[in-house]
Image (cartoon, helix red, strand yellow):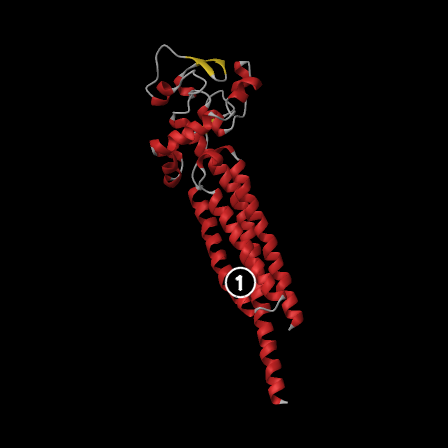
């Protein structure tokens, strides 16, 4: 029985270690530009990582200190957390399934449209109240100012591989026909296009295209990239947790069988 408890404890210790990638994914998302302004996914991921750590630690303690109630708590709670993690993985996959950049003539960077993304993601930026806070967060960052230090010639800028937020928020859409002066300063065309984003563009460095639909689309494209990267980590961890849980469950069942058999032998003798 002691050997079985040690095996179960070692397995649960692996589960403790598996909580670290989940916690890391949550912390990583808080450092990314888009997620730091939207703050939607990182907290569920981080909280789930903390709960998995606590439950796995309870199972580890229960195994080495031979506390059956803690082991039973571990088996039930970890099953619930695995189901929640699986639901989160599926959810992220569904809401990020749609969304792509659009090629513009003579441009290396892509441009983005809000309608290309899932309805759930679009609702994160549609509310004027939500977007006002996001816009304030974006305008206080250095994502656009950095472009002025890197590109001084129009052709170099047109050949640049901009991030989705730089493409959507730091310059007017290509279809508007603005003339390049520098990455964040453009001359308005004589005949303004009918697209509302063309009217929203401002050379004011605190405004730029932060109020454009293209900026919202660029933000969603960035969220999609960041969430899909985090989801790879969550998926791998989920598969590992399921394997650890199954091994731990069989070890626990074998330990209980050995205990019952031992008691039967003692009673028989």
The N terminus, quarter of image: bottom right
State the residue position of label 1: 74
Residue 127, by quadrant, is top left
Of residues 34 and 176, the one nearer the viewer is 34
Q: Position of residue 155 (x, y in %)?
A: 53, 16
The percent position of residue 201, horizontal first and vertical second, equals 39, 19
Tell me the quadrant of the picture where the C terminus can be found. Answer: bottom right
**Residue plotted at (40% across, 31% down):** 133
Residue 159 visible, this angle: no
- Residue 132: image x %, image y %? 38, 29
Closer-to-camera residue (232/143): 143
Question: Which sits in the foreground, 100 or 127?
Answer: 127
Kindly give the residue lying farthest to the bottom in the view shown.
269
The residue at 49%/56% (across/down) is 81
Which image quadrant for residue 232?
top right
Q: Residue furthest top?
A: 190
In the rendered image, is residue 175 in sight?
Answer: yes
Q: Position of residue 11 (x, y in %)?
A: 62, 61
* Dot 1 alpha-carbon crowd within 10 angstroms: few under 14, some 14 to 19, many 20 or more: many
């Amino acid at each position: 029985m002691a050997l079985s408890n040690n095996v179960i404890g070692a397995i649960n210790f692996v589960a403790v270690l598996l909580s670290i990638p989940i916690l890391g994914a949550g912390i990583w998302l808080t450092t990314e530009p888009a997620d730091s302004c939207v703050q939607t996914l990182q907290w569920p991921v981080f909280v789930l990582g903390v709960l998995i750590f606590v439950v796995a630690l309870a199972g580890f303690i229960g195994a080495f200190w031979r506390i059956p109630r803690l082991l039973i708590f571990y088996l039930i709670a970890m099953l619930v957390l695995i189901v929640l993690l699986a639901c989160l993985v599926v959810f992220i996959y569904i809401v990020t399934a749609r969304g792509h950049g659009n090629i513009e003539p003579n441009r290396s960077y892509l441009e983005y449209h809000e309608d290309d993304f899932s309805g759930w993601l679009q609702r994160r930026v549609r509310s004027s109240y939500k977007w006002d806070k996001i816009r304030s967060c974006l305008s206080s960052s250095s994502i656009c100012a950095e472009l002025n230090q890197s590109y001084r010639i129009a052709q170099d800028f047109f050949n640049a591989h901009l991030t989705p937020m730089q493409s959507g928020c730091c310059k007017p859409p290509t279809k508007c026909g603005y003339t390049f002066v520098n990455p964040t300063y453009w001359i308005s065309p004589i005949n303004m296009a009918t697209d509302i984003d063309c009217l929203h563009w401002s050379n004011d460095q605190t405004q730029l295209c932060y109020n454009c639909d293209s900026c919202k689309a660029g933000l969603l494209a960035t969220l999609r990239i960041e969430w899909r990267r985090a989801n790879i980590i969550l998926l791998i961890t989920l598969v590992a947790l399921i394997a650890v849980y199954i091994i731990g469950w069989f070890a626990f069942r074998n330990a209980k069988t050995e205990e019952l058999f031992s008691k039967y032998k003692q009673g028989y003798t």
